[in-house]
């Protein structure tokens, strides 16, 4: 129970990887505030957390709205008295388009949730963490924010912005005992990838881009987030933990593939 006595706020935790992060933190003893823009989904995850024996509170709210993030943190402190851990997981990827076809409203939607929402949540927990003498902020970025992906310009830019935000906040808030880190996943067999998991040909093609030839299992991501939330990661700050099976460091090389086939 590495997180016994801790209080975590997880955004976008009504389903997908956010739900799994919430349950993983609860498994290690944390009380969990479950946020989701769909309040009913937040309530379902909160029930699952409580079924594991941890305390939970469900919080509806849109992270792209500053007022909502302030209310969320206020509710957490009202319920539990503090916020030790913030997992900025809420994110969207509503379209795959060539750059020239992206519309203003689409661009704004991605930036509002994926980047502005992360910043607003960080701002909202800052005074609480400062007053209590510290805390952990973990921002969920993406491997796409480091290396880019065709058709995902807005998503890639938003996730790259999260990495810069992480580094700057780590510099500025370390003096208050607050560490800020990011996780950059590659392909996960869950979350946003759930709609394609039944398409074996597509999954196999994508997995070929990974040296380990597979997607990450959800628990492999959860373990990283739990680690960064605990005391074992006390000296990690301003870092981006890339969890992509080596995909970013070793891009496919068609020339090498041709040589191997001869």
Image: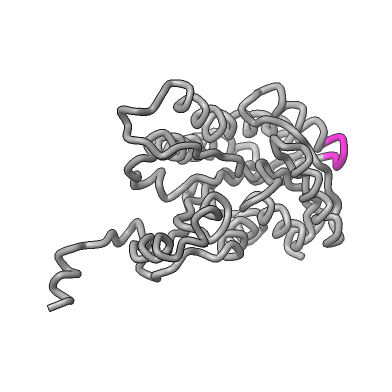
**Left or right: 81 in relation to 13:** right
Which of these two is toward me, 19 or 167?
Answer: 19
**Left or right: 138 in relation to 214:** right
- For image coordinates 66% across by 54% down, the residue present is 21
Q: How is the image coloured?
A: one colour
The image quarter containing residue 96 is top left
- For image coordinates 67% across by 30% down, the residue present is 62
Magenta stretch containing residue 162, yes or no? no
**Left or right: 167 in relation to 29:** left
- Residue located farthest toward the bottom when viewing the structure as drawn: 262
Secondary structure mainly formed by the magenta segment = helix
Please identify the quadrant where the C terminus is shown: bottom left
Which of these two is toward me, 145 or 182?
Answer: 145
| Residue 177 image point, x, y percent | 64, 42
Please identify the quadrant where the N terminus is shown: bottom right
- For image coordinates 64% across by 31% down, the residue present is 63
| Residue 17 image point, x, y percent | 62, 53
The answer to whether 220 is drawn above or below residue 179 in the figure is: below
Magenta stretch containing residue 80, yes or no? yes
| Residue 11 image point, x, y percent | 67, 41
| Residue 95 image point, x, y percent | 45, 37
- For image coordinates 54% across by 49% down, the residue present is 192
Magenta region, residue range:
77-81
Number of numbered markers = 0
């Amino acid at each position: 129970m590495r997180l016994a006595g801790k209080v975590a706020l997880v955004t976008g935790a009504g389903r997908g990887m956010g739900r799994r992060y919430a349950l993983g933190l609860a498994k290690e003893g944390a009380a969990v505030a479950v946020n989701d823009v769909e309040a009913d989904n937040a309530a379902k995850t909160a029930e699952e957390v409580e079924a594991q024996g941890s305390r939970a509170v469900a919080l509806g709210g849109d992270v792209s709205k500053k007022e909502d993030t302030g209310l969320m943190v206020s509710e957490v402190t009202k319920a539990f008295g503090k916020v030790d851990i913030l997992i900025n997981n809420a994110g969207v990827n509503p379209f795959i388009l060539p750059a020239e076809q992206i519309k203003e409203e689409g661009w704004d939607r991605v930036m509002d949730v994926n980047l502005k929402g992360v910043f607003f949540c960080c701002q909202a927990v800052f005074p609480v963490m400062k007053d209590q003498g510290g805390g952990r902020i973990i921002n969920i970025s993406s491997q796409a924010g480091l290396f880019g992906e065709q058709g995902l310009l807005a998503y890639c830019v938003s996730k790259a912005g999260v990495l810069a935000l992480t580094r700057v906040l780590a510099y500025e808030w370390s003096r208050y005992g607050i560490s800020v880190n990011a996780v950059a996943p590659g392909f996960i067999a869950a979350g946003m990838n759930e709609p394609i998991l039944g398409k074996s040909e597509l999954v196999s093609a994508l997995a070929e881009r990974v040296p380990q030839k597979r997607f990450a299992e959800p628990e492999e991501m959860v373990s990283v987030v739990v680690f960064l939330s605990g005391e074992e990661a006390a000296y990690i700050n301003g870092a981006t933990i890339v969890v992509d099976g080596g995909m970013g460091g070793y891009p496919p090389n068609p020339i090498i593939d041709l040589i191997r086939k001869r």
